[in-house]
Amino acid sequence: QVQLVESGGGLVQAGGSLRLSCAASGRTFSMYAMGWFRQAPGKEREFVAAIRWSAINTYYADSVKGRFTISRDNAKNTVYLQMNSLKPEDTAVYYCAADRAPSQVRVPGEYDHWGQGTQVTVSS
């Protein structure tokens, strides 16, 4: 069983930066693919970024490509999402997710484990 706890959210002005962290419990963290998703009020949960266990393969939504960077530190059981050049449309609750081998990393249903989320608000 993997438990995930997100942190690092907050209020930031447009153009600013935030770094989200997701700390995972469990000794097999390094074997899990990790994903970040977000959900704005009244909208469906959407894919943001994902990283395979090896950290060689990373994936991004078109809307964040070039602005966000996902990374992981397996020694610390932590995955990060560095968010730069933030826009008001990035405002959402951001969720961390984990799965051993998601066949489609962009699909929320492929992940078995989820954190409780952290709020990111970008003011204009």
Image: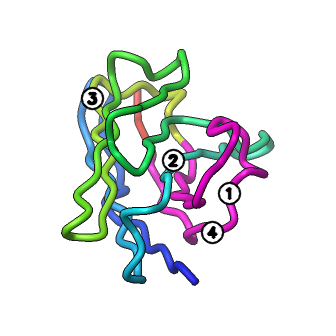
Amino acid at pointer 1? Tyr
Where is residue 84 drawn, in percent x and y?
A: 27, 29
CB contact under 8 Å: marks 1 and 3? no
Where is residue 112 drawn, in percent x and y?
A: 69, 65
CB contact under 8 Å: marks 2 and 3? no
Can you tell which of label 4 and label 3 is closer to the viewer? 4
Q: How far apart are marks 4 and 3 (CA)?
A: 26 Å
Amino acid at pointer 2? Trp
| Disc marking residue 113 | 4
The secondary structure type at the circle numbered 1 is loop
Q: Mark 4 or mark 2: name the one nearer the start of the chain.
A: 2
Q: Mark 2 or mark 3: name the one nearer the start of the chain.
A: 2
Q: Mark 4 or mark 3: name the one nearer the start of the chain.
A: 3
Q: Disc 2 marks which residue?
A: 36
Where is residue 64 drawn, in percent x and y?
A: 45, 23
| Disc marking residue 4 | none
CB contact under 8 Å: marks 1 and 4? yes
Q: How far apart are marks 2 and 3 (CA)?
A: 15 Å
Q: Disc 3 marks which residue?
A: 84
Q: In this view, does 9 lie to the left or right of 115?
A: left
| Disc marking residue 111 | 1
Q: How far apart are marks 2 and 1 (CA)?
A: 11 Å
Q: What stretch is highlighted in magenta?
A: 92-120
In which quadrant of the rendered view does residue 13 lie?
top left
Dot 3 surroundings within 10 Å: few (below 14), some, or many (20 or more)?
some
Amino acid at pointer 3? Asn
Q: Mark 1 or mark 3: name the one nearer the start of the chain.
A: 3
Q: In this view, does 23 lie to the left or right of 64?
A: left
